[in-house]
Amino acid sequence: ERVMTQSPATLSLSPGERATLSCRASHSVSSNLAWYQQKPGQAPRLLIYGASTRATGIPARFSGSGSGTEFTLSISGLQSEDFAVYYCQQYDNWPLTFGGGTKVEIK
Amino acid sequence: QVQLVQSGAEMKRPGASVKVSCKASGYTFNDYYIHWVRQAPGHGLEWMGWINPDTGYTNVAVRFQDRVTVTRDTSSNTAYMEVSGLRYDDSAVYYCARGGEVWVAALDSWGQGTLVTVSS
């Protein structure tokens, strides 16, 4: 099983700042990595797939990078609606596995 | 537009079973995998399994294989997940999500979630 580790657990930032979230896989997942955003009481929403491709309707301030075992989600110019929990997920290997999440909160 | 609509909240006793439905619309149901993911209160996301609606073939995570059954009804574009032998720690929100045309794909659309509460 691919273990996905996200850091930091919590990121405290102000609106307008840049957020950098990390996700590490225990073994290579190639580029089969997705990022999701989840707000309280809502289902997750796909942001990024293939490690770096934005899903339909996702603003350009969200960008993903990496391959193999190290991945990054960047949010440039945080807006109020971006404060949420973010999860990475690998779909390269069965079973699919998620990271523990990074909460981006208002400083 | 793609839409997945799940059945309503359930409250069950320990040892009972629960069956959650997920009705798909806005796309060709048979062409995309349906996955099931759960989230315990205050916790992260846990993948449970998937079904290929076209073939009916399923793949369930090892830890759930003895208690979870995933099925589908292509006549109504609906997927189902049944959990038997419910335990207190099965209390969670259960989501269905659309995968890709192959199982190696991200989950691009999600249902609204179904809260299952296990309580005596």
Image (cartoon, grey):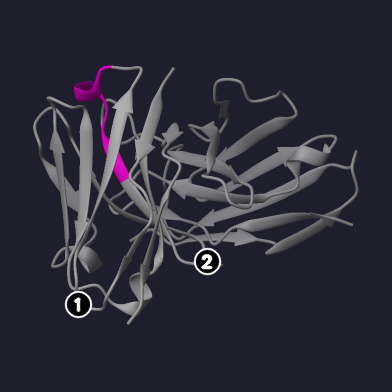
What is the chain identity of the residue bearing mark 2? B
Is residue B32 a member of the stretch shown in magenta?
Answer: yes
Asked whether residue B61 is in view, the answer is yes
What is the chain identity of the residue bearing mark 1? B
Badge 1 element: loop
Quarter of the figure with the C terminus of chain B: bottom left
Q: Residue at x 89, y 57 (%)?
A: A107
Badge 2 element: loop
Asked whether residue B103 is in view, the answer is no
Task: Tell me if mark 1 has few (under 14), some (14-19) or many (20+) residues whose alpha carbon lies within 10 angstroms of its own.
Answer: some
Q: Residue at x 28, y 77 (%)?
A: B87
Please state which amino acid type lies under the numbered disc 1. Answer: Gly
Q: Residue at x 55, y 56 (%)?
A: A24
Please state which amino acid type lies under the numbered disc 2. Answer: His
Relative to A35, B77 lies left or right: left
Instruction: Look at the picture and state if B67 lies above or below A54.
Output: below
Mark 1 → mark 2, Cα distance in angstroms: 23 Å
**Are both tags, 1 and 2, on one chain?**
yes
Q: Which residues are magenta?
A: B28-35
Residue B100 image point, x, y percent: 32, 29
Task: Tell me if mark 2 has few (under 14), some (14-19) or many (20+) residues whose alpha carbon lies within 10 angstroms of its own.
Answer: few
Quarter of the figure with the N terminus of chain B: top left
Q: Nearer the viewer, mark 1 or mark 2?
A: 1
Q: Nearer the viewer, residue B64 or A89?
A: B64
Q: Mark 1 or mark 2: which comes first in sequence?
A: 1
Q: Circle 1 sits on which residue?
A: B15
Is residue B23 a member of the stretch shown in magenta?
Answer: no
* Circle on res. A82: none
Q: Circle 2 sits on which residue?
A: B43
Residue B52 image point, x, y percent: 18, 35
**Residue situated furthest bottom in the rendering:** B120
Q: Nearer the viewer, residue B32 or B8?
A: B8
